[in-house]
Amino acid sequence: MTPLKRGRVRSKFKTKINIKSQKFEIKDCVTSDVSLNGLYVISEEKPLINTPCTIDLILDNGIQKPLAIELEGKVSRMGKDGFALTFTEMDSDAFIHLKNIIQYNTDSPSDFFQECKKKVGFK
């Protein structure tokens, strides 16, 4: 688990992601961490901040058919090796999947459970 600099527990989680907007499309990049607010994408491409986009988070265990979790978001900041996306909309299934991803990949599930009690939803 990483420090709570941005207000939510973040978990190291690497998975494939596809991002699409009216201005760009990025396929097959990789996440480095994820929270209920957003995620960080490792990418050489740097879209403009505040650009709205559709995010397909691809869950692939190598056994079953990959599952794509669709989320709406926007580009929120740039980093040296990529950029951050903040979630703006998701359905209840996507929210449950995200909670499970974070819960099972954090070093401290108890901190995450406390966060879920204090902050309901993804905002």
Image: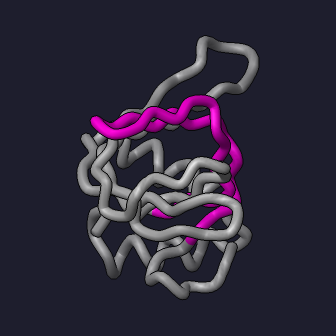
Quarter of the figure that contains the N terminus: bottom right
Q: Compare residues 107 and 24 and report the one nearer the observer.
A: 24
As displayed, is residue 100 above or below residue 110?
above
Identify the residue at image location x=71%, y=26%: 61
The answer to whether any part of residue 52 appears in the image is yes
The quarter of the displayed image where residue 111 is located: bottom right
Look at the image and say whether residue 44 sits in the magenta stretch. no
Where is residue 22? Give x, y as percent. Answer: 28, 36
Residue 81 appears left or right of 70: right
Where is residue 99? Give x, y as percent. Answer: 47, 54
Look at the image and say whether residue 18 sits in the magenta stretch. yes
The quarter of the displayed image where residue 11 is located: bottom right
Residue 12 appears left or right of 58: right
Identify the residue at image location x=28%, y=50%: 52
The answer to whether any part of residue 105 appears in the image is no
Where is residue 6? Give x, y as percent. Answer: 47, 82
As displayed, is residue 19 above or below residue 4?
above
Q: Compare residues 118 and 20 and report the one nearer the observer.
A: 20
Q: How many marks?
A: 0
Identify the residue at image location x=32%, y=52%: 73
Identify the residue at image location x=59%, y=75%: 110
Magenta span covers which residues? 10-35
The overriding secondary structure of the stretch rendered in magenta is strand
Quarter of the figure that contains the C terminus: bottom left
Where is residue 93? Give x, y as percent. Answer: 33, 37
As displayed, is residue 10 above or below residue 115?
above
Q: Compare residues 105 and 38 and report the one nearer the observer.
A: 38
